[in-house]
């Protein structure tokens, strides 16, 4: 019996299953730690901007604050109002985290560690998979708004669904030129394309695509300046108003998981992923240390983006809803379309 | 009045000047707080604010310079107290005499319910013996209601020694002020 298991573990299939399981476990945990700590970073950064200090009591420099928050949200009363639609009310927070976690599977977060490629699923249709699951993100918010069965959450949910569907179009269109240049939908190939010096990074080749993707990413993740679904001043809280305890925390974590994921996607698509155009770090690592360095480079780039997300939230006021829709439909979609056409013409002339 | 809105030019409509302006403000505050230590936050239990001199905190009983009880159990403060937070039990005919000369009696028990007290300062104002003062304590805590009823020993201990008998001096000053009350310019 034990021999059979060991044989299976040494077989290619067994190796694949075991290593993937380990990678899934580690990647998921790293993502959750990032999500937990980015909340703390956000609270400290916004405090500094507002001449405050921020949470600094729990542990040294407040570093154990996420643990305290988790304990708090688990032990708070989980209140279900009598008027909610119960099944959707339970379902909405359950699927809030799902798109971000599922999308983690196709993000190449490193080159190689030993013989293992540092991507959970090297899909040939990586970006289609990503967009497929990103569009599922609207379900948790729309369902939460619907389940609450009262005015303001419903308004928040409606706003969210209109906003996310609108910006998904410009987001999807903005990355088309990227794949026209790369010639593949596989995210690992996108990184391979960018591994030839700093100016092979797609942000320099497709700045307009990056700009549109960046703004659409803010709208997709409901971050300021596009945080209309949870506009407290207008909606008394937004789609998550009836939620308490860990259910509320799940929406909160979902938001931060989404911005982590979108940051990772921007790094992969436009900023060379795990590559760095110095010290030969743009080729797949041969040694273990090189592999670790690539993962750290990737994480560092993601952190820069996360910091940008946080900074912008505390820097800008919210857009008005008509301005948001105007920007999405009348500015970005034509621009993204023009970008596709221009890229196509240039590629055609070159060939 | 109609405020004319100037149409934004292309540069302004790009949102970039607002972006740069916002970034300048936030980075200034961020660096000033993080590196300059200019946060306005007060780390409360460790740092405390300076209590102004005429602050009305918790009312406590005070002793004179010999450590004797100033209160003569006249019960004026009990009478004047709007929320009825003060309870005084006089010594009665067979009770203990005052522990200082020039006083007929002192309270057998003197309680202030700090949960009821509204820190109005009427007791201090009405006290003929200058025996009760609103001192500067503002953070009164306890784990039960019973704990928040301060008895005579506790009030005297918290109040401390408060100088000698000054009431005649103060009464003289008040009387002099009365004489030239309609202030002549």
Image (cartoon, rainbow, N blue to C red):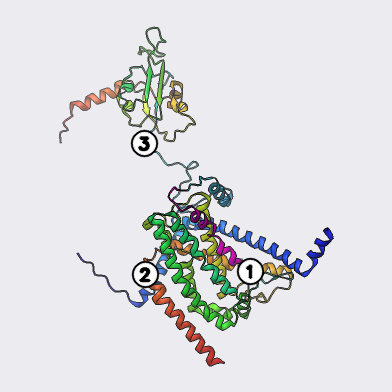
Where residue A350 sits in the image (x, y, percent)?
A: 55, 92
Prevailing secondary structure of the magenta residues: helix
Marking on residue B53: 3
Where residue A9 sits in the image (x, y, percent)?
A: 78, 64
Circle nearer the viewer, 3 or 2? 2
Judge whether A66 appears above or below A350 on screen.
above
Circle 3 SS class: loop
Circle 1 SS class: loop
Quadrant housing residue B68: top left
Instruction: Write the start and end of the magenta stretch as one range.
Output: A81-105
Q: Which quadrant does the N terminus of chain A fall into?
A: bottom right
| Magenta-span inclusion, residue B73 | no
Q: Are marks 1 and 3 on the same chain?
A: no
Marking on residue A109: 1
Where residue A100 sits in the image (x, y, percent)?
A: 56, 64
Q: Do labels 3 and 2 share a chain?
A: no
Residue lying at the far top of the rendered structure: B94
Residue B2 lies left or right of residue A201; in this view the side is: left
Circle nearer the viewer, 1 or 3? 1
Tag 2 and tag 1, C-beta contact below 8 Å: no
Q: Residue at x 63, y 76 (%)?
A: A124
- Measured in 3D between alpha carbons, the distance from the residue under mark 2 to the one under mark 1, in whole angstroms, is 36 Å
Q: Mark 2 points at which residue?
A: A323
- Measured in 3D between alpha carbons, the distance from the residue under mark 1 to the one under mark 3, in whole angstroms, is 62 Å
């Amino acid at each position: 019996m034990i021999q059979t298991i060991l044989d299976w573990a040494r077989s290619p299939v067994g190796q694949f299953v075991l290593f993937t399981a380990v990678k899934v476990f580690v990647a998921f945990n790293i993502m959750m730690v990032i999500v937990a700590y980015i909340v703390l970073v956000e609270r400290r950064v916004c405090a500094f901007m507002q001449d405050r200090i921020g949470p600094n009591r729990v542990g040294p420099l407040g570093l154990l604050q996420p643990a305290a928050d988790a304990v708090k949200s688990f032990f708070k009363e989980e209140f279900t109002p009598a008027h909610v639609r119960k099944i959707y009310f339970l379902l909405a927070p359950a699927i809030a985290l799902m798109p971000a976690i599922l999308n983690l599977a196709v993000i190449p977060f490193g080159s190689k560690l030993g013989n293992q490629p540092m991507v959970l699923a090297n899909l040939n249709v990586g970006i289609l998979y990503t967009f497929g699951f990103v569009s599922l993100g609207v379900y948790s918010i729309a369902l939460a708004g619907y389940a609450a069965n009262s005015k303001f959450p419903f308004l928040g949910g409606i706003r969210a669904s209109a906003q996310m569907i609108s910006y998904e179009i410009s987001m999807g269109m903005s990355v088309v030129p990227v794949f026209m240049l790369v010639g593949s939908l596989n995210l690992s190939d996108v990184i391979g394309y960018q591994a030839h010096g700093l100016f092979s990074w797609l942000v320099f080749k497709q700045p307009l695509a990056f700009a549109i993707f960046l703004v659409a990413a803010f709208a997709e993740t409901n971050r300021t300046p596009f945080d209309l679904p949870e506009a407290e001043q207008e909606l008394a809280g937004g789609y998550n108003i009836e939620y308490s305890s860990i259910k509320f925390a799940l929406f909160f974590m979902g938001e931060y998981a989404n911005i982590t994921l979108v940051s990772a996607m921007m790094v992969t698509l436009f900023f060379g992923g795990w590559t760095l155009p110095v010290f030969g770090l743009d080729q797949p690592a041969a040694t273990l240390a090189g592999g670790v360095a690539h993962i750290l480079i990737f994480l560092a780039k993601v952190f820069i983006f996360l910091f940008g997300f946080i900074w912008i939230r505390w820097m800008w006021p919210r857009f008005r809803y008509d301005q948001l829709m105007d920007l999405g439909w009348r500015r970005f979609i034509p621009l993204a379309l023009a970008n596709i056409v221009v890229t196509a013409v240039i590629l055609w002339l070159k060939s | 009045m109609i405020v004319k809105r100037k149409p934004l030019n292309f540069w302004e409509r790009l949102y970039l000047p607002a972006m740069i302006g916002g970034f300048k403000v936030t980075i200034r505050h961020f660096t000033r707080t993080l590196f300059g230590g200019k946060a306005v936050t007060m780390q409360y239990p460790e740092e405390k604010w300076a209590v102004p001199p005429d602050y009305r905190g918790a009312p406590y009983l005070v002793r004179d310079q010999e450590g004797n009880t100033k209160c003569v159990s006249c019960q004026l403060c009990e009478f004047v107290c709007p929320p009825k937070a003060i309870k005084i039990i006089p010594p009665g005919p067979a009770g203990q005499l005052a522990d200082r000369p020039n006083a007929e009696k002192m309270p057998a028990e003197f309680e202030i319910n700090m949960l009821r007290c509204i820190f109005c300062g009427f007791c201090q104002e009405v006290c003929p013996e200058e025996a009760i003062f609103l001192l500067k304590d503002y953070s009164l805590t306890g784990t039960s209601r019973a704990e928040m009823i301060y008895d005579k020993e506790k009030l005297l201990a918290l109040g401390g020694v408060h100088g000698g008998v000054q009431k005649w001096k103060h009464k003289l000053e008040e009387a002099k002020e009365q004489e030239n009350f309609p202030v002549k310019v």
